[in-house]
Amino acid sequence: MTDTLIIALTTMGGLGFIFAGGLAIADKKLRVEENPLIGKINDVLPGANCGACGKAGCYDFAVNIVNGKMKVNGCPVGGEDVANLIAKILGVEAEPAIKQVPRILCRGGNNEAKDKSTNYKGPQSCAVMEIVGGGTKICEFGCLGGGDCIAACQFGALIMNDNNLPEVIEDLCTSCGLCAKACSRNLIEMHPIDRRVFVFCKSNYDPKRSKEVCSAACTGCGICERVSDGGVVVKNNLAEINYDLFYASNFPFDKCKTKAISYLNDKDNTIHKLVVNQ
Amino acid sequence: MPKIFNNLLSFKGGVHPKEYKYLTSSLPFEKIPTPSKIILPLSQNIGAPSTPIVNKKDEVFAGQLIATQNGPISAPIYSPVSGNVLSIGIEDTVSSFTKESITIKSNENLEMELFPKLDLNNISDKEICKRVQMAGIVGLGGAAFPTYFKLTPPKDKIIDYVILNGCECEPYLTRDYRLMIERPKDLIAGLKLIMKALNLEKGAIGIEDNKQDAIDVLQNLVKDDNSIKIFSLKTKYPQGAEKMLIKAILNREVPPGKLPFDVGVAIQNIGTAIAIYEAVYLGMPLISASLTVSGLGIKTPKNLIVPIGTPLIDILEYCGGIMEDAKRVVVGGPMMGITQHNLNAPIMKATSGILVLTEKEINQFDETNCLRCGKCIEVCPVNLTPTKLARFSQLGRISEAEENGIFNCMECGTCAYVCPANIPLVQWIAFGKKKLSLAKKAV
């Protein structure tokens, strides 16, 4: 009885020692040196693996930073804090980054933009509505209200307001830009958070059709171009702001009849209203 | 031999929606008065839009060439009326997308310029193709593929059969049926021209068995002619889809991603054959469309001959206007047609019908969850699993959708028609196809 026990113990123990020895040799001979910086940077990243930086995930981003292929402030979700931490690890100076937030450049909600009134009952997704007869609104440039941007946001920073237009909650936004990619009509653009004046329209329709299809459209009348000294240029029936030359304090906003070019007004914001009401 | 078994030619799957063909099947074609305004979209066919050769304020006459062919897959456009060009610009069309269009204000002048006469006794295949190309004829079954292109197949494809598609499997529509009844001789002449253009000995016409009198009329005409056969097919949607038609008549299966050419068959629509007859025998360019105006929401349903470019509203007014309980106007058949939002949009070359539908005919329900009943798989004529494809598209798993054959779907809508959960299967599949082709383009 004890013999069997001893034989079993020695064979298993012996095998264990042989394999352990093999592993120990392999550890010495086949060791891959990983830059310890990668691990350190990976630890300070948000770990959401959202892909907003353009890399496969946070670890991939860390590898690319150490190889010098990405900038220190390349993680939009982490923002300034993470950029500073990475800069500290690498021993470099972080460039100051201004938070970028998405801006929805269309104000043609249910109240403004004309509806096709075709009783659409298909999937509520902009990309699908777009191919099923070009959406439910007559305007071919404006927001479809299907909420693809809201579905794309992983941080709950977008909501649909009563007028069927998406709104950004700046405090929750991590600047990842996935909503801008999801918009099938490219209406969402990322802008620095302190930029408050925009042309809230993307329509290239001529003035007559613009007026027909939406009351908030840029008609391309050109008044803004004439009064702004190059701050606004009208191209293809659509005003475009040149932010280097544009001075909001000098611009007569009331000249724009449809309010297509105007301030981003927080007071109209659904979230703002909710906060005030509480 | 008496028929003991009802062994009709058909295909696997399919459905038989309520027909409603009785509304217009007994009404002969009427010509509508010349509308005051004509809008001609420059892109009325698959392929490149035509190039306009008139300017604003120019005077045009009926039958004048106003836009030329642009590239191999394209077709010229002729003015159906005399008048002045009002504008050239973006207009709404029945495809529910806006397109560059020429608007013409018409006058009373009805004189028309025709093509020079051809020597009909020894006409060559090249002459026929050239005339078809010149007349701007496109497939009038709905897809609007330039016809001359289909008459000049690539050299390496051997074609041995031409089939005229007289199925008209969409409910309501009776245009092809009326053409077969009213102009059988022209139709056979048109078919012979197609056969001559392709140098073929054998031709066939496939007709669903709910149009027995059309079958009888044509059968009577060709009883001494061995080259043309009339086939009676089971009434089932989508019998008129070309792959289903070839399967039913010749029992040849068009492989996924291939064309009828690849199994040696050329398919043309009944309306196209008549248009070819008119172009060759009468020298007429394609300037008018025959169509069915039907549905329970229109005062007097009619079969009409309408100048191409006539706004829908003019046609609907000629038919007595829309009833109060009408819910939507659809251009095309109810299964594959497009809902309209602007009744000023003009009809195009391949418009086969205008339907004014009431609540009762639309039957819209809310979507619920998939029951896994498998009905969509049972009825799919091309053996796909629609529910799976729709789910893959919805989740963005497009490579799996491709593996499951999403590109074989022709969006006939049979699956969505039978779905007890009212899942918008076709929309999701169309979305997946679009996404997949965009992804392929990007690579």
Image: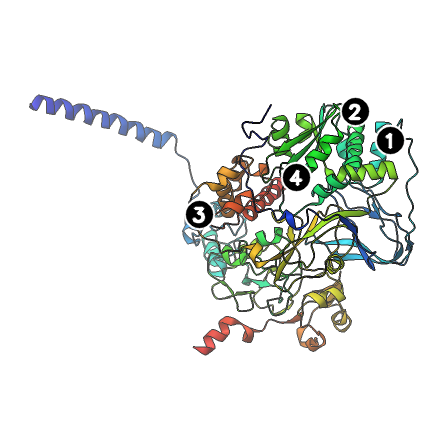
Task: Using the image, name the chain to which the residue with label 1 belongs.
Answer: B
- The residue where tag 4 is placed is B211
Distance in Å between CA atoms under marks 2 and 4: 30 Å
Q: Are marks 4 and 3 on the same chain?
A: yes
| In this view, the mark in front (4 or 3) | 4
Distance in Å between CA atoms under marks 3 and 1: 55 Å
Three-letter code for the amino acid on which mark 3 is drawn: Cys
Distance in Å between CA atoms under marks 3 and 2: 51 Å
Q: Are marks 4 and 1 on the same chain?
A: yes
Q: Are marks 2 and 4 on the same chain?
A: yes
Numbered disc 3: secondary structure: loop
Task: Using the image, name the chain to which the residue with label 4 belongs.
Answer: B
Distance in Å between CA atoms under marks 4 and 3: 37 Å
| In this view, the mark in front (4 or 1) | 4
Numbered disc 2: secondary structure: loop
- The residue where tag 2 is placed is B199
Three-letter code for the amino acid on which mark 2 is drawn: Asn
Task: Using the image, name the chain to which the residue with label 2 belongs.
Answer: B
Numbered disc 4: secondary structure: loop
- Quick one: A135 or B20, which is closer to the camera? B20
Residue lying at the far front of the rendered structure: B2
- The residue where tag 3 is placed is B370
Q: Are marks 3 and 1 on the same chain?
A: yes
Q: Earlier in the sequence, mark 3 or mark 2?
A: 2
Distance in Å between CA atoms under marks 2 and 1: 13 Å
At which x and y percent is residue A52? Answer: 52, 52
Around disc 4, counting alpha carbons within 10 Å, would you say few (fewer than 14), some (14 to 19), or many (20 or more)?
A: many
Residue B127 has which mark?
Answer: 1
